[in-house]
Image (cartoon, helix red, strand yellow):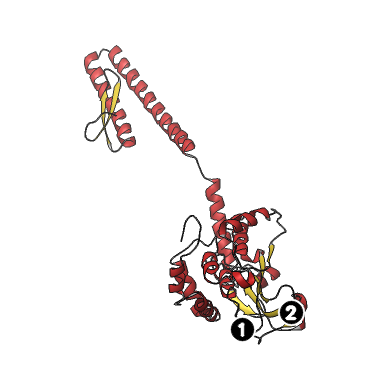
Amino acid sequence: MDQNNKYMEKDLILKLLDSGDGWQASEKLMSILMDKTKREKLFRDFLSHETDVSYDWFCKFFNDEMAERTKKQQYFTPSFLSDLVAKIVDTDNKDTKTNFDSAAGTGSLTVAKWNTDRLKVNPLIYRPSDYFYTAEELKIEGQPSRALPFLLFNFLIRGMNGVVISGDSLSRKVSQIYFIQNDTDNMLGFSSLNVMPRTETVAKEFDVREWIDEPITHIESPSPMPEFLINRITGVTSDEDKKLLGSLTKMKNLIANFKTAEEMRAERLGIYKTQCNEIRNKIKSAIKAGDDLIQSGLNSKKVNKYRNRHVYDMVQKWFSKTYKDKEIKIDTENNTIEILSKVGVRE
């Protein structure tokens, strides 16, 4: 991947698709996409080389290999321009969670919009089902659409929900309508690929005026609807949602109990002050006891020696507990304390 222009190298793409050129790669990819097991293995192979899904990996590859500039004046949107457009059309309206990309190509604009959408939401509460993306790509009757497999790939590997219409956006002659769904509503999961049946309801919904090519029968998503949608409608909490709720609760508690380094230092200082006050009070008691003994007629030299030893032991004990890896030197006559490292270096 080129870090400046953001694209995947041509040789790597051809190698992963086991193809000799772009045209062969397109056909090979389309056949793999229709087999869920092979498709998801291919996704993992790609992700082992590139984990940044914020941009369209195939933009430069397709532009250089398969864009028909002479007949169709075909040019594909570079990543930086897709990012700019996605930010311009981002209205920050929470109710606007749909996206339409006509003449989508490999899906560079849709990928950029998807990336903008997901980055606006806390990853702990992000749900792919909250967003729906529609893309249309040109398909001429009897001819393969070279960009379509890469467009579908971009939807599926990112776990999007949406529809890809393969046909003519102006005449509304449509070959196939691909319904893409993240069946588990998992932000880290892949989507399923389904082909919509050619019914009157579907034709009316997507403004299909004429069907072209042979119909494809291909359904992967569970019927009648995914479990997460049923749970949302019925109000039942799934096991995955319970785990997520537990994680959110733990995170909330961690944040509530979070202490800054300054607060922790202040807390430790308060503990030390309390302990120092306890030592000071004990020292005062020892001094007073010594004075009482001297006044009662005992030898002041012996009393002071005993008293100093008692004070020394108390201070030594506390500092040794507090500074376990240090050497403590206490001079009770001059009232000084030195804290040294084990090798005897003064701090």
The three-letter code of the residue at mark 2 reads Val
Q: State left or right for residue 107 relative to residue 335.
A: right
Q: In the displayed structure, would residue 185 be above or below residue 334?
A: below
> Can the viewer see residue 273 in this picture?
yes
Q: Which residue is mark 2?
A: 202
Residue occupying image coordinates x 55% and y 79%: 30
Which is nearer the eye, 108 or 36? 108
Residue 344 is situated, as x and y percent measured from the top left of the image, at: 22, 31
Q: State left or right for residue 314 relative to residue 57.
A: left
Residue 44 is situated, as x and y percent measured from the top left of the image, at: 47, 71
Q: Quadrant of residue 143?
A: bottom right
Residue occupying image coordinates x 45% and y 73%: 14
Q: In the displayed structure, would residue 251 be above or below residue 182?
A: above
Residue 58 is situated, as x and y percent measured from the top left of the image, at: 53, 67
Q: State left or right for residue 116 relative to residue 41.
A: right
CA–CA distance in space, label 1 to label 2: 15 Å
Which is nearer the eye, 259 or 147? 147
Q: Quadrant of residue 318?
A: top left
Evaluate if marks 1 and 2 touch, with contact meaning CB atoms under 8 Å apart. no
> Can the viewer see residue 221 in this picture?
no
Q: In the displayed structure, would residue 216 be above or below residue 68?
A: below
Q: Earlier in the sequence, mark 1 or mark 2?
A: 2
Label 1 residue SS: loop
Q: Quadrant of residue 275?
A: top left
Q: In the displayed structure, would residue 51 be above or below residue 88?
A: below
- How crowded is the residue under tag 1: few (<14 C-alpha within 10 Å), some, or many (20+)? some
Q: Which residue is mark 1?
A: 218
Label 2 residue SS: helix
- How crowded is the residue under tag 2: few (<14 C-alpha within 10 Å), some, or many (20+)? few
Residue 5 is situated, as x and y percent measured from the top left of the image, at: 51, 57
Q: Quarter of the image for the C terminus: give it.
A: top left
